[in-house]
Image (cartoon, rainbow, N blue to C red):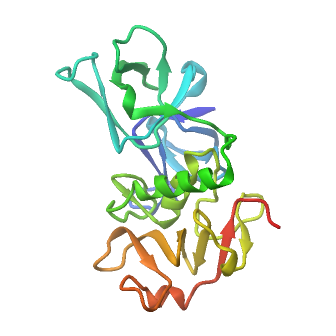
Amino acid sequence: MYVAATPLCPLFEAPEEGAQRVDEILLGWPVSGPEEVRGDWWRIRTHYGYTGWVRREGLAPAAERPLGERMVVTASFADVLAGPEVERPVLTTLPRGSLPTVREGQAPEGWRRVELPDGRNGYTKGSFLENYYGQPGDLPEEQLRARVVERAKSYLGVQYRWGGKSPLGIDCSGLTFMAWFFSGVLLYRDARIVPGYPARPIPLEQCRPADLLYFPGHIALYLGEGRYIHSTARAGSDGVVINSLDPDHPDYRADLREKLLTAGTVFPLG
């Protein structure tokens, strides 16, 4: 087992320069493999079942880096500093969703000591982190839906990036994945419903906030009242925006409403 050792470790569809980026894993995310090796390229499988090719130097052995207290970065970005003072050198900057190893003790109030996968130790603000849960907690359904919507909205204005999953750039399925990731639900990485993953189809009229909208090659998160949030490369949007299914709304996207295939939910049916 390995973990991503860099803030953003891109996955490519082929082991060669210029290959298309299909996904990216964030620092501390576990992967298994290699399933295949070609030079310094490894084909690996993410903890949510997605596969791709990475550079070997982008990974570190997980066994040598105990997870300790598992926490997740919730700020857009979190600097890891050489010491617990803001004037100290920046060792690296972690994007939202990173899973650094957090060590207890030896940190002044307001700071947390973290160990990076390359063995370096540093400090980041405690307000940038929260506990990470690998599965949904005991939140009531309405609170969970509101939490997922809030996480999705935290990416508003982020530019569109094919295969992206961070505040530096994110694509449509990256956005819906990350919106649910913080609540311990791992969706399929691409814009379709796949057996074995949490999302199941539902009629559009049953769609509620935090449910999913599927279009050909595209996915969005439903907000309620006919509105949805998505990452789109459409000229004039160029990133994460909110649009509407209502023809009378100024944010209506006729091209998407006409192509809507189905809605989906991770909640029990019936």
Quadrant containing the C terminus in the rendered view:
bottom right
> Residue at horizontal 35%, vertical 67%?
239
Q: Is residue 95 visible from the viewing direction of this image?
A: yes
Compared with residue 167, is residue 118 higher up or lower down, i.e. above or below? above
Question: Number of numbered discs present?
Answer: 0
Compared with residue 18, is residue 119 higher up or lower down, i.e. above or below? above
Q: Quadrant of residue 170?
A: bottom left
Q: Nearer the viewer, residue 160 or 176?
A: 176
Does residue 27 appear to the left or right of 77 in the view shown?
right
Residue reaching furthest to the right: 270
Q: Quadrant of residue 253?
A: bottom left
Q: Position of residue 73 (x, y in %)?
A: 43, 37
Quadrant containing the N terminus in the rendered view:
top right
> Residue at horizontal 53%, vertical 76%?
225
Compared with residue 210, is residue 143 higher up or lower down, i.e. above or below? above
Q: Position of residue 94 (x, y in %)?
A: 37, 37
Q: Nearer the viewer, residue 42 or 84?
A: 84
Q: Position of residue 16 (x, y in %)?
A: 45, 56
Compared with residue 141, is residue 33 higher up or lower down, i.e. above or below? above
Does residue 15 appear to the left or right of 195 in the view shown?
left
